[in-house]
Amino acid sequence: MSETPRGPRILTDDAPAPRLDFGWDVTVAPVAVTPPAGRRGWSAPALAAAGVAVLLLGLSAIDVGGYVADQFTRAPWLGWLTLGVAVAGYGLILAAMLRELRGLAGLGTVERGRAAVARGDFAAARAALLDWAGRLPAAQPMLPALRKAPDLPTLLALLEAGPLAALDRQAVAAGRAAALQSLAATAIVPSPALDGLFIAWRGLRLVREVAVIHGLRPGLLGTLKLLRRTLFEAGAVAAADVAINAAVTAVTTNPLVASVVGDAASGAVAARRMLLLARATARACRIVEPR
Amino acid sequence: MAILTPLEDALAGVADAARALAGRERVRLAVTGLSRAGKTVFLTSLVANLLAAGAGVNTLPALAAASGHRLRGARLVPPGVESTPRFDAAAHLEALAADPPRWPARTEDLSTLEIALDLAPASLLGQARGWVAGERRVTLELLDYPGEWLLDLPMLDQSYADWSRETLARLRQGRRAAAAADFLDFVDALPAAARDDEALARQGFRLYRAALLRCRDDLGFRFLQPGRALNPGPRGEAPLLWFFPLPGGAGGDLGRLLARRHAAYLADQRSAFFEPFFRRFRRQAVLVDALGALHAGEEAFDDTAAALAAIAASLRRGGGWLNLLTGQGVQHVGFAATKADHVPEPSRDSLVGLLRDLVGRDTAAAGGATTSVHAIAALRCTQDDVARVEGRDVAAVRGVLLEGGRSARIYPGEVPIRRPGRDFWQHGEFRMPVFRPPRLKGDGMAGMPHLGLDRMLAAVIGDLL
């Protein structure tokens, strides 16, 4: 039977070599879900909606142009008046579209800032965060210090200590106000269907209020985008609240309690949901994800 | 033990329970190990990989699985008003990633660091608590210190006479006797009733320290006391250090002077090091360079085993039934054979077996602590390879040498699963070359490549998360 050699030894001593590379960064990188090829860009419904919008606006513009030209043939003053009305109308539509785009751009800044912070890319994060802070009144006193921040942790710490803490407080206050209104509404609104309508409207308004607090002015598209993101964030916020929600629901659906407190019980549930919505929206709007 | 210590422990136990109830646990992880066992690199890797894991990077898969993937974030606790230096994990990582890379120098002082781990709630109760008190957070307290000081722990229960007798007996054995010949000649020549002449005390200490340094640096021995004679720390050399073992113990004026210094030294170590930092830890990682001990020869191997047994016995005496009452005992002990990347994968199980044999079967602290044994490399520096030795293909490791930057294949020899017999040591000693760290990102965003660190952490702190 042969034995393995026992004594340790240095076997070879080759030419100079570079440091070993185990590809560790790649091995441990979190698995990123990339959208499959061919699905980049606009979705089919978005393309269809854009086509309908182009048709509506384009055909109506051609139609209005022809109408303005007809009016000029009748009388110059009538032509100018019609042109003025048309320009004012299309101008308002254009202003609305610009506002939508600006709202979407604001959300884009938040997304770019978050991505840069997650990557640890100081230069990109600094650019996005300063862009965001420059447009936010609450961040103005902190701007000089933010510009001089030497690294990412300092920049984030300054933001957390100053503007973001103030914005979080304002968002919580907005949530409380909405919760109180929901509580009051469920007590005085006579129909459960109207209750639901009020809660839906108040929730949508709350999302926009919190977005404005965070320096975003989302239009319709921006609000829809924000609502979608808020739904994801609500999962994270609600995860910590499952037990409380279960307890509130258990108590408020108890027949005895319901007979004593009446509709106020369902109002309490609605109020809690408003507070939750405010926290979820604040998470969605924050340029730096809460630590 | 001071009279008030059990009371303090009981109060600390109540505070621990209150913090656990509020979801704000603080756990001291004592990273213990003899000198050159790799404590500093272990702590650097632990911090870098936990911070990266907190950012969602999969650096510690076994720990993540053990904790049910509940780790939401990790961050260093900002410094407060501590008087102890802060363990600079970022600087150590930058030095390892630099070109040319630098391994941490021998640790000369205590340093501490706290890392806060944010965790998702594990139960409905935890979720309810999270709503009231915020996310659950476990703060790990970490400590780095000169490994030589750990050998002062067994001295705490010994009188000067007992310590002198045992130390001299060890010094007269085998290769130590040659390294300490000058010192042994000196003390053997001293009369039993020598006067307390300071010149005698200083000369004796100089010779004793020179003997200790030779035993440590040339022969690879570890059971060397007192620790501050080898590594005085930032406070430098003080008169209380100037003692050495005497054959007659505390007899005579010189003996009494040395006994006073011995007692003052122990009191100082107890109050400055052991009491504030080595009490009330719940988790313990014991790092052992088992392969280095194996390569240093039979005597050095047995010396390491004796040092570990003495430390384990001291830790057991420090626990006991009072810990059961005050809830302050060690709960989990993880023994780790470090530098496991110096042997190929098939030999790592043997390394675990060897360490299990080295630390003995009764090393668990009192109070029912669970123990586990691992082979780890806090920073992996080699990859497995095959080499031809004496006409046979054997498993080897390949790495880049720190000196000169050349690639080298190392056959680390047979790794026995228990203390080998006498014929094993015939091949003589071997000094493992120092390898260059692999390519690293100095920002620590991806942690540090390791072997088995996650499994060890899963066993030691996995249940906390």
Image (cartoon, coloured by chain):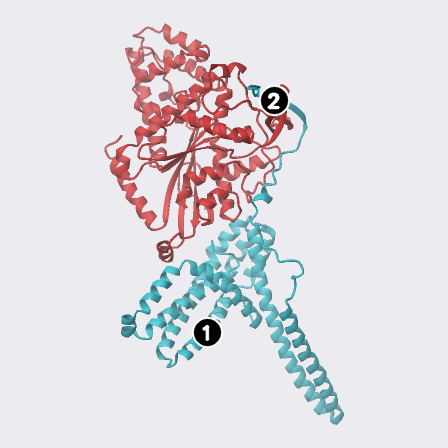
Chain colours: A cyan, B red
The residue that label 2 is drawn on is A10
Residue furthest toward the bottom? A74
Q: Is residue A202 above or below residue A290?
A: below
Instruction: Pinpoint residue A118: horizontal percent, then vertical percent.
Output: 55, 52
> Looking at numbered disc 2 in the image, what kind of residue is underneath it?
Ile
Q: Picture quarter containing residue B190?
A: top left
Question: For this view, does B75 lie left or right of residue A189?
Answer: right
The residue that label 1 is drawn on is A200
Instruction: Pinpoint residue B243: horizontal percent, then vertical percent.
Output: 36, 17
Q: Is residue A8 visible?
A: yes
Residue furthest toward the front? A1
Q: Quadrant of the N terminus of chain B?
A: top left
Instruction: Pinpoint residue B153: horizontal percent, then vertical percent.
Output: 35, 26
Local SS, label 1: helix
Q: Chain of mark 2?
A: A
Front position in the image: B164 or B239: B164
Q: Picture quarter containing residue B12?
A: top left
Q: Chain of mark 1?
A: A
Label 1 to label 2: alpha-carbon separation: 75 Å
Q: Residue at x 29, y 12 (%)?
A: B253
The first of marks 1 and 2 along the sequence is 2
Local SS, label 2: strand
Front position in the image: A202 or A33: A33
